[in-house]
Image: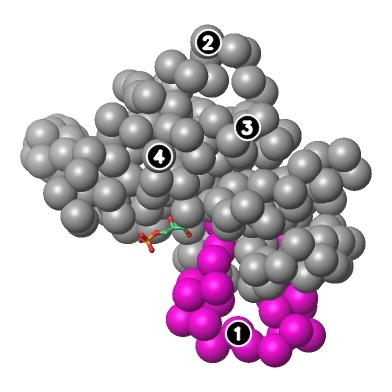
Amino acid sequence: MKFFIDTANLEQITEAQNLGILDGVTTNPSLMAKEGITGDSNIISHYKKICEIVDGDVSAEVISTEFDGMVEEGNRLSKISDQIVVKIPMTKNGVRALKYFSNNNIKTNCTLIFSPGQALLAAKSGANYVSPFIGRLDDISSDGLSLISEIRQIFDNFNFKTEILSASIRHNMHIIDCAKIGSDVVTAPLSSIVGLLNHPLTDSGLKKFLDDHKKGNF
Ligand code: E4P
């Protein structure tokens, strides 16, 4: 399973990259705004910086909701680097844009997926990734992980090449459950990724090893 980090924060991206486990980055307009990145040229140069830090795919979301605007923006974003994946919302225009980019060999990530039908349409349109939002479904007392299972089953039935990129991860267990279900990718905040490191028995076990080593030295 691939690990993407879900942020536009360069320090956090660098920290995850330095861990040696990072396969890519996802951003969205809210995450870019959180870092204070506004205006076309700042946005483009921020994506360039992200691409320089990581080796893998970097999702860059279009703002336009019109087909022509999505195509224009996506073409512009894709020129930044081969690593750029154009992130397109799940709308009627978005589906058309996914098909356009697929025909033009530009990688895409279809975002804001909340149902199996939306994932199926995105896959049919040639999206490279679909991003089902687990946490936001859980937030409204729905079952985000069931959606991942349903999409897995549908994609496997027809050998779709589209990868499931589980998003809106809220905690470590979402990552573990996605791995069990067979999600191709998870995109998570740094805190959830490094949270996987923690276990109290590891801490106490290490402390005992180091204490015993010290005793042995006297
Ligand atoms: C996915 O690509 C989105 O950026 C993200 O996972 C949304 O997560 P949120 O629900 O925590 O905003």
Give the x, y percent position of residue 26: 56, 56
Q: What residue is drawn where x is 77% and y is 42%? A: 99
Closest to the observer, 8 or 148: 148
Question: Residue 76 sits in which quadrant?
Answer: bottom right
Tally of marks: 4
Question: Residue 190 sits in which quadrant?
Answer: bottom left
State yes or no: residue 64 in magenta.
Answer: no
Residue under circle 4?
Answer: 115
Q: Residues within 10 Å of mark 3 (few under 14, many from 20)?
A: many
Q: Describe the element under mark 3 as helix, strand or loop.
A: helix
Residue under circle 2?
Answer: 157
Per the rendering, the mark at residue 123 is: 3
State yes or no: residue 39 in magenta.
Answer: yes
Residue under circle 1?
Answer: 37
Specify start and end residues of the magenta stretch as a single range.
24-53
CA gap, disc 3 and disc 4: 13 Å
Task: Examine the rendered structure and indicate whether residue 30 appears above or below residue 17.
Answer: below
Callout in the foreground (1, 4)? 4
State left or right for residue 31 relative to residue 65.
left
State left or right for residue 46 relative to residue 31.
right
Decide which of tag 2 and tag 1 comes sooner along the chain. 1
The image quadrant where one finds the C terminus is top left
Question: Residue 197 sits in which quadrant?
Answer: top left
* Residue 109 seen in the figure: yes
Q: Describe the element under mark 2 as helix, strand or loop.
A: helix
